[in-house]
Amino acid sequence: MTSHTTNALLEDINAKFDVILEIVRPLAELPERVGWLEDDVRELKEDMKVVKVAVTDTNRQIQKHEAIFQGFTCSLTTANSPHDSD
């Protein structure tokens, strides 16, 4: 093999290694990205727990207000109904 042929082969091999490195390099970042995603998911789960508690509390308050309003309208209806005093 001549020096020129050897250099050409080495350049070809280096070019192929460069392509492989381009493909493999992002894989090295995966553990960091996965850790970041895990943290975000954990935070979102905690936020959802807070939202669920708030929605449940709001629904209970609405039900209480509706019950009070229902009782109030019933007493108004009873108070305003004509009496059988004829």
Image (cartoon, rainbow, N blue to C red):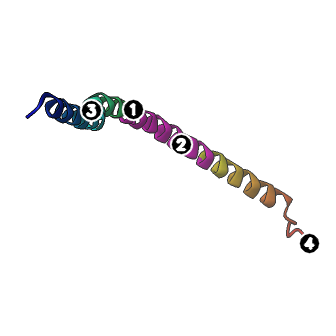
Picture quadrant of residue 20? top left
Query: Who's the residue at 57% across and 41% down the image?
Result: 58
The reply to whether the C-beta atoms of the residues labelled 4 and 1 are less than 8 Å apart is no
**At which x and y percent is residue 39?**
35, 29
**At which x and y percent is residue 82?**
87, 66
Which residue occupies the foreground of this view, 48 or 78? 48
Tell which residue pokes out farthest to the left in this image. 1
Residue 8 is marked as none
Which residue occupies the foreground of this view, 76 or 43? 43
Please tell me whether residue 54 belongs to the stretch shown in magenta. yes
Give SS at disc 1: helix
| Mark closer to the observer (4, 2) | 2
Tell whether 46 sits left or right of 74: left
Query: Who's the residue at 37% across and 36% down the image?
Result: 41
Amino acid type shown at disc 2: Val
Residue 55 is marked as 2
Residue 59 drawn above or below residue 26: below
Gap between marks 4 and 1, in whole Å? 74 Å
Gap between marks 3 and 2, in whole Å? 55 Å
The reply to whether the C-beta atoms of the residues labelled 3 and 2 are less than 8 Å apart is no
Residue, disc 3: 18
Start and end of the magenta stretch?
A: 40-63
**At which x and y percent is residue 22?**
30, 34
Amino acid type shown at disc 1: Asp
| Mark closer to the observer (1, 3) | 3
Residue 86 is marked as 4
